[in-house]
Image (tube, helix red, strand yellow):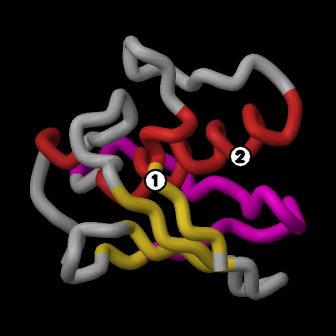
Amino acid sequence: MYITDIGHFLDAKGAIGPQKGPARVMAEFHAGVIAYATDFSDTGVIAPNCFKCKKSAVEFALALDDAIYWSCPRCKAEGRMSNWRGTLWDLSDSGDQHS
């Protein structure tokens, strides 16, 4: 399981810090998971494909402690992400919550 504090991937302005390589790929994946998991409107944010197998869209759940839990149904990669609230990809103030 990947345990991520999204703040570790961000620069001082809150944007993705890593410019290239595996860290950039992981940061972009997590940003996509945040946007997908917090899009409570009908804007149609698409679930990102798993960064590991790249073949399946990830699923998510919001944990009681406010972490985002994500998993890939195909390769079984999974993770928990914290400190995502207030990031550039947090869309949770834009509408109603998922049922």
> What residue is rendered at 20% in x and 48% in y?
92
Residues in magenta, as a range: 41-60
Which amino acid type is shown beneath numbered disc 2? Met
Q: Is residue 47 above or below residue 72?
A: above
The picture quadrant where one finds residue 22 is top right
* 21 left or right of 67 in image: right
Main secondary structure found in the magenta portion: loop
Around disc 2, counting alpha carbons within 10 Å, would you say few (fewer than 14), some (14 to 19), or many (20 or more)?
A: some
> What residue is rendered at 46% in x and 53% in y?
5
Which disc is residue 5 wearing? Answer: 1
Q: Position of residue 12 (x, y in %)?
A: 41, 15
Q: Is residue 54 above or below residue 85?
A: below
> What residue is rendered at 45% in x and 62% in y?
81
- Measured Cα–Cα span from mark 1 to mark 2: 12 Å
* 96 left or right of 24 in image: left
Along the polypeptide, which appears first: circle 1 or circle 2? 1
The residue where tag 2 is placed is 26
> Which secondary structure, mark 1?
strand
> What residue is rendered at 23% in x and 55% in y?
40
Q: Residue furthest top?
A: 13
* 48 left or right of 12 in image: right
Residues at circles 1 and 2 in contact by the CB criterion of under 8 Å: no
> Which secondary structure, mark 2?
helix
